[in-house]
Image (tube, rainbow, N blue to C red):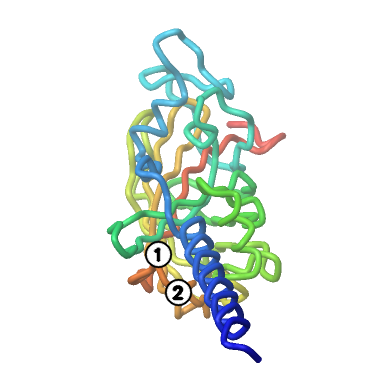
Amino acid sequence: MTARSQTGRTRALIGAGGLAVVAVLAFAAWFFLVSDDAPEAATSDDAIATLGDDTGSIPRGNTPSGSVEPASIDGVWTVDTSVGNAEYPFDDRSYVGYRVTEELASIGGNTVVGRTLGVSGRLEIAGTQMMAVDILADFTRLESDSSSRDSALRTQALETAAFPEATFVSTGPVDLGEVPANGDTITVDAIGELTLHGVTNTFTVPLEATLVGDTIVVVGRATVAFADYDIATPTAAIVVSVDDVGELEFQLFFTRADGDVEE
């Protein structure tokens, strides 16, 4: 082999290696990098505000705060999946999602947020007791700011192709302390079993629940340690670190189950 051919081969190998590095960095960029306008975590005030506005538009047939109190909140309430009116599709709809913080080389900290509208579930209330909470989230419908990242989650981290659903089922009643008045927010902890990534653990979920007319608004967030659910954090050259914990967050609107009429 001549010196010229050896030089050409060396250049080709270097070029191929350079392309591989570029490909890895590009993969890391779309997987980990998020825009600076990641949505804020839900709050009770923001969720309640979506039930009506100054124009009098009140989705889901709800009654604004300050109206006649319902006779009773006893019975079964189910997650309302009706389509909202907000420009951002998650603002006024029920969702479950995740929030993870990462540190990127030469970029700094970023927050990754993904949410799914594929939520179903129920509350059962008797007097001042929330007797049961049962929530199921379809993680195959998770959406972040990157469809490529969402696709990658099928086989990495949450591995939604193998573990498509996450569930939370309470293991005992929750004492509300009192029957909530219309517009009042009650803060409680619900203890149950969280199944995530195929692993089930006892889990405590802090909830803020507000009765708004014919709707119960439930908002909350809780820290999840990835190791507890056998979730491996993705790695790439651009990533300095990814937190070994994330936040499970949710905004849920409950309305009475069909046929479950107030007394």
Q: Residue furthest top?
A: 55
Q: Is residue 114 above or below residue 165?
A: above
Q: Position of residue 16 (x, y in %)?
A: 58, 73
Position of 25 relative to 259 (above/below): below
Neighbour tally class for label 1: few under 14, some 14-19, many 20 plus, Cα within 10 Å = some
Q: Who comes first in sequence, dot 1 or dot 2?
A: 2
Residue 246: numbered disc: 1
Q: Position of residue 216 (x, y in %)?
A: 48, 37
Quarter holding residue 180: top left
Which residue does the numbered mark 2 point to in the structure image?
Answer: 226
User: At 50% across and 51% down in the image, what residue appears?
Assistant: 114
Say above or below: 49 vs 238.
above
Judge the density around disc 2: few (<14), some (14-19), many (≥20) Cα neighbours within 10 Å. some
Residue 255 at what x, y percent from top left?
58, 35
Q: Nearer the viewer, residue 236 or 37?
A: 236
Quadrant of the rendered image containing residue 163? bottom right
> How many numbered circles are shown?
2
Q: Quadrant of residue 191?
A: bottom left
Judged from the image, the secondary structure of the residue bearing numbered disc 1 is strand
Identify which residue, 22 or 149, lies in the foreground: 22
Q: Are marks 1 and 2 in contact (CB under 8 Å)?
A: yes
Q: Quadrant of the C terminus?
A: top right
Q: Nearer the viewer, residue 253 or 25?
A: 25
Q: Amino acid at mark 2?
A: Phe
Horizontal arrangement in the rendering, residue 256 relative to residue 212 (left or right): right
The CA distance from mark 1 to mark 2 is: 7 Å
